[in-house]
């Protein structure tokens, strides 16, 4: 996947028609992005999740400003859900950071909505849909073709399911039923280790699934 997990999650959480966060994701988008960052840092071996706790492993930057900001603020010996709660207040503007990062890369574009000549609000348009389409295609391949997910897609699929936005990808009711079965069980994928699997299960409870 060419995007970070957080970036991919954010693109799915963004309503393509409205140019703003889906109503279903308004309360979960920041925790979801933070969870994605922490779990990607674990996949990158920047931290480890032994025993369900965060342990610093490597503070050298990743080259991704958002991931690095999260990495530098993580505390040792905390559970992922506790860290999400603590960091949520420190990253209130993380959506703006993602908008800026994705706009810089030519994936999103900020548009100003107006009534006559009066500015009303900003919206984010998908300037290069190929990135989001790749995510959608891969998720559908996992569900309908039993394609083995990469560790990154295990995390992404699980978070999209947990935060209640799976229907944004699988809009057909019958397809959604099949996707929900995968989303429920993907935490047990052999593509992630036991520590990651246990944290993903913890996050299911955290998000109410």
Image (cartoon, rainbow, N blue to C red):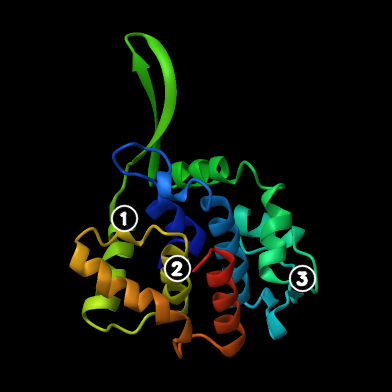
List the residue tagged with mark 1. Answer: 168
List the residue tagged with mark 2. Answer: 156
Q: Is residue 53 visible?
A: yes
Residue ID at (38%, 57%): 165
Q: Is residue 150 visible?
A: no
Who comes first in sequence, dot 3 or dot 2? 3
Q: Residues within 10 Å of mark 1 (few under 14, many from 20)?
A: some
Q: Position of residue 43 (x, y in %)?
A: 57, 77
List the residue tagged with mark 3. Answer: 78
Residue 25 located left or right of residue 72: left
Please count the marks in the image.
Answer: 3
Q: Residues within 10 Å of mark 2 (few under 14, many from 20)?
A: many
Q: Nearer the viewer, residue 128 or 12?
A: 12
Question: What is the quadrant of residue 1 in the picture?
Answer: bottom left
Q: Residues within 10 Å of mark 3 (few under 14, many from 20)?
A: some
Q: In this picture, is 151 found above or below 206?
A: below
Q: In this picture, is 129 found above or below 145?
A: above
């Amino acid at each position: 996947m060419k995007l970070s997990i957080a970036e991919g999650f954010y693109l799915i959480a963004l309503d393509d028609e409205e140019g703003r966060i889906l109503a279903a994701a308004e309360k979960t988008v920041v925790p979801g992005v933070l969870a994605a960052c922490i779990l990607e840092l674990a996949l990158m071996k920047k931290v480890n999740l032994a025993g369900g706790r965060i342990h610093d492993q490597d503070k050298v930057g990743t080259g991704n400003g958002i991931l690095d900001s999260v990495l530098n603020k993580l505390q040792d010996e905390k559970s992922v859900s506790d860290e999400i709660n603590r960091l949520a207040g420190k990253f209130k503007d993380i959506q703006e950071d993602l908008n800026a990062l994705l706009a810089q890369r030519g994936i999103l574009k900020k548009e100003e909505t107006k009534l006559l000549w009066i500015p009303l609000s900003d919206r984010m348009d998908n300037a290069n849909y190929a990135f989001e389409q790749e995510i959608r295609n891969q998720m559908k391949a996992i569900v309908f073709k039993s394609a083995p997910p990469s560790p990154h897609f295990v995390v992404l699929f699980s978070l999209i399911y947990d935060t209640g936005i799976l229907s944004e990808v699988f809009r057909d009711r019958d397809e959604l039923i099949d996707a929900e079965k995968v989303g429920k069980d993907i935490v047990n994928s052999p593509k992630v280790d036991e520590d990651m699997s246990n944290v993903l299960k913890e996050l299911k409870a955290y998000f109410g699934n």
